[in-house]
Image: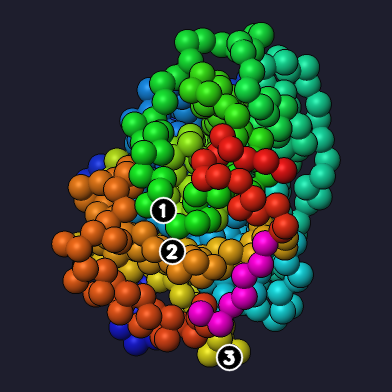
Amino acid sequence: MKEGQITRRTFLHATALAGAAMTVGCSSASVLNTENRLKTSEMKDNKKAFDKPNIVIITCDQLACDAIGANGNEYVNTPGIDHIFANGTSFDKTYTPYPLCTPARASFWTGQLPHQTKITSNLSTMMHNRTITIGSIFSEVGYDTYHVGKTHDAGSLRGFTVERDNLRIASNPSPAYPEHFQSEEDRVTIQKAREFLTKEHDKPFLLAVEFNNPHNINNWIGEFQGKHGDIEGMAGPLPPLRANYKNDDIQNRPEAIRYACCLQVRQEQVSEWDDRNYRQYLNAYYHYTNMADDLVGQVLLAIEHSDARDNTLVVFMSDHGDGMGSHKLVAKSSNFYDEAARVPFVLMGKGIPAGKRINSLTGLCDLLPTLCHYADIEIPKPRTEREVIFGKSMLPLLSSNKPIHEYMVSQWYTQLNNNFVPSRMFRTEDYKYTHYLNDGGEELYDMANDPGELTNLARKPEYAETLKWIRKEFHHYLETTDDHYFNEKFSFQESYRKHQEGFRNHTT
């Protein structure tokens, strides 16, 4: 143990305020609306008291912060996720290191940024097999490390026993909400998670349960691409468009935003959509979110009916968000608007205050040091300077207003190795700055007064000094983290930017 390091015992003692130390138990059956409830008679009485806490990480792919009931969305039904928010602490300014599945996962399992892991697309090759990971750290100190569900890890799940993620259980869904591999695989994931949780445990465990949904929305877009009318069987009424739906400031955005329809297939597929089609998309997105929430509720019930229910930390998070129609963007691509880049991150368990909201900057790279801090495990020294962990423990934020990060970053290179658009987000407490390498495009948003990112301030003379300052801070980040961003190369498919500006003008 390093001198001066806060131990788990000290941490729990310091944060165990009256009523604040919560277990993962569900207060009522109505809170978690699941189809396959565990019977009360299956409750295990032989609770195991290990020196180390158990940890359950629950991930919902492509879940935006604003698509959760606990965050004020009245058009979605998320009682399971809401339960975690109500009984845990939410870190409300958590950002993904990369708004794309594989690079984001490689980063949060290692605590490193994408330029460090070298996992920069969904098709990236495997990382070095000696890279420090959450699985390797916890398995080496005696944890039973088990992973079920979506992988997309590029080798970052080293140290876990990983169940196959391509088994499926089909159903007979409504034509309005077609189900693809994502939803079908999730049904297997919850079965495997429940089997693991309800067995008898002879040592502490770290269980990762990674659901695909609401990622099924991507295939829904493909099914309903192009302008269309009413959708038979779609439950109504349709939710309203978001306040930042309109693209009035599109001419003042970087080229990669103005021509997003040329860079991402899902954005191309919606180029002809009208307002009603976007509302249908939100309806479907909330439907798949509801499906994910039902499974989250089942995980919580399985913990409650396990021998680990009184000593388990629950982590709930997403790898990245979804465009949600804001700025007329869908899914995710080379943009860093909060709908895609900011993610839910909640801790619930012993020593974690209930119903607390923290607004300091945090990131998914903080997962590894946070878990090690909570379990009182020392992080191994990196093999090289390049492998220095970017993340920091979030736990000090539970009892102090002192920030752990002065800034947060997110990166983009490419999705499928076809269009390379290197870009960066640099987020401070008050401002968000983005830079796109291909045209030098910049964005600057006053996040306190313009949370919808409606007005790009980068070209406004009155913000020249702010822009100069944040550019300097951005370059300082590049130097101190060995991010050779300005040495990257960009390239595009021939069809890129072959039409007038505006998604409606897209041609293939």
**What is the secondary structure assignment of the residue under circle 3?**
loop
**What is the secondary structure assignment of the residue under circle 2?**
strand
Q: Amino acid at mark 3?
A: Thr
Furthest-left residue in this view? 462
> Pointer 1: what residue?
253
* Mark seen at residue 441: 2
Q: Is residue 497 left or right of residue 4?
A: right
> Which range of residues does the magenta coloring cover?
486-492
Dominant SS in magenta: loop
The location of residue 289, given as percent across then percent down, is 55, 31
- Of the residues under marks 3 and 2, which one precedes in the sequence? 3
Q: Is residue 195 left or right of residue 347?
A: right
The location of residue 161, given as percent across then percent down, is 75, 59
Q: Amino acid at mark 2?
A: Gly
- Of the residues under marks 1 and 2, which one precedes in the sequence? 1
Q: Amino acid at mark 1?
A: Arg
* Mark seen at residue 384: 3
Quadrant containing the N terminus in the rendered view = bottom left
Q: Residues within 10 Å of mark 2 (few under 14, many from 20)?
A: some
Judge whether residue 124 is colored magenta.
no
Residue found at x 26% / y 69%: 467
The location of residue 497, given as percent across then percent down, is 61, 53
Q: Is residue 181 above or below residue 484?
A: above
Q: Residues within 10 Å of mark 3 (few under 14, many from 20)?
A: few
Residue found at x 24% / y 54%: 446
Is the C-beta separation of discs 1 and 2 under 8 Å? yes
Quadrant containing the C terminus in the rendered view = top right
